[in-house]
């Protein structure tokens, strides 16, 4: 899918000019430290930017290096994360930090190139860290960037990812990958929003209130304080017992909690 150079030049100019005037001031944009960028990318998965800022700042103050995070207790990691949602991410991040320290000698950027060995990290996150920390001339596409390409180049919403990446590679200004991706994300978040364009994200987040996700978070908060029996949890939540057991079993499978004779605890180290 070739695009005329003149059109690419105009597109690049519009996006970068907008960013130079309207860019969001975000704490993870003040650093190129790969570990700091990794933390921000983990937190930003399925979570709004404004909710992440305070958590990110507090996290970096508490654990300023991947080695410090690797040495932290699971209890401290989970209790610091609580409130961000999708609490498996905290466990994955903790496990990933340990692997980076022990297998990659603390080299976060090197580890990102072997992301399949790192829990909770897929192609998008690995590329994002390499872009924002290392300014590598590679492309990645989040929901905002996808929406921009579909709108600006008059594409169908069903356009395959491989075609979007082909366009992304044509449009990437060499040597400016960090600037370019930040600019695209802000343009998508502030100008070409889903509401304005009518372009829906590929996946839709389920409602939170009353969901299994909400109950998992509440269970985790309870178990951070003390252990609970199945009967105590059943009395607290007053939901179908089979639903409660399914939620608990999923948390056990994710190695977040453990069960001993129907007494539930936070997973120990």
Image (cartoon, rainbow, N blue to C red):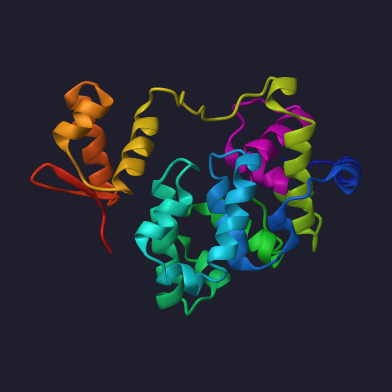
Write the residue at 38% across / 38% down. 217
**Left or right of 193: which side holds 52?**
left
**Residue 149 included in the magenta stretch of the image:** yes
Q: Is residue 74 visible?
A: yes
Write the residue at 46% across / 40% down. 85
The answer to whether 101 is drawn above or below residue 116 in the figure is below
Q: Residue furthest bottom?
A: 105
The answer to whether 142 is drawn above or below residue 56 in the figure is above
**Count of numbered marks:** 0
The answer to whether 161 is drawn above or below residue 53 in the figure is above
The image quarter in which residue 223 lies: top left
**Residue 133 included in the magenta stretch of the image:** no
Q: Residue furthest front?
A: 225
User: Relative to the observer, which residue lies in front, 153 or 33?
Assistant: 33
Write the residue at 79% across / 55% down. 179
Name the image quarter holding the C terminus. Answer: bottom left
The image quarter in which residue 251 lies: top left
Name the image quarter holding the N terminus. Answer: top right
The answer to whether 107 is drawn above or below residue 56 in the figure is below
**Left or right of 226: which side holds 103?**
right
**Left or right of 228: which side holds 176?**
right
The image quarter in which residue 249 lies: top left
Chief secondary structure of the magenta span? helix
Residue 48 in the image, given as x and y percentages of width and height: 61, 38
Residue 93 in the image, given as x and y percentages of width and height: 45, 58
User: Relative to the observer, which residue lies in front, 243 or 82?
Assistant: 82
Residue 187 in the image, given as x and y percentages of width and height: 79, 38
Q: Is residue 118 visible?
A: no
Residue 110 in the image, given as x and y percentages of width and height: 54, 72
**Span highlighted in magenta in the image:** 141-168
């Amino acid at each position: 899918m070739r695009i005329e150079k003149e059109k690419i030049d105009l597109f690049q100019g519009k996006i970068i000019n907008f960013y130079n005037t309207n860019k969001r001031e975000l704490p993870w944009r003040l650093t190129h430290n790969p570990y700091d960028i990794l933390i921000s990318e983990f937190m930003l998965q399925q979570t709004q930017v404004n909710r992440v800022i305070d958590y990110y700042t507090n996290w970096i103050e508490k654990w300023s290096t991947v080695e410090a995070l690797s040495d932290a207790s699971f209890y401290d990691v989970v209790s610091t994360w609580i409130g961000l949602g999708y609490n498996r991410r905290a466990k994955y991040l903790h496990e990933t930090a340990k692997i980076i320290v022990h297998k990659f000698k603390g080299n976060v950027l090197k580890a990102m190139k072997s992301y399949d060995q790192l829990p909770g990290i897929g192609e998008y996150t690995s590329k994002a860290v390499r872009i924002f920390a290392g300014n590598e001339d590679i492309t990645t596409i989040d929901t905002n960037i996808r929406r921009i390409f579909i709108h600006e180049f008059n594409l169908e919403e069903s356009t395959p990812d491989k075609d979007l990446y082909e366009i992304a590679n044509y449009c990437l200004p060499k040597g400016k990958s960090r600037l370019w991706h930040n600019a695209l994300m802000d343009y998508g978040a502030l100008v070409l929003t889903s509401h304005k364009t009518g372009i829906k994200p590929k996946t839709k987040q389920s409602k939170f209130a009353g969901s299994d996700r909400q109950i998992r978070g509440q269970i985790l908060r309870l178990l951070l304080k003390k252990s609970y029996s199945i009967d105590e949890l059943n009395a607290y939540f007053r939901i179908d017992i089979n639903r409660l057991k399914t939620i608990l079993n999923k948390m056990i499978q994710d190695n977040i909690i453990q069960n001993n004779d129907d007494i539930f605890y936070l997973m120990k180290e």
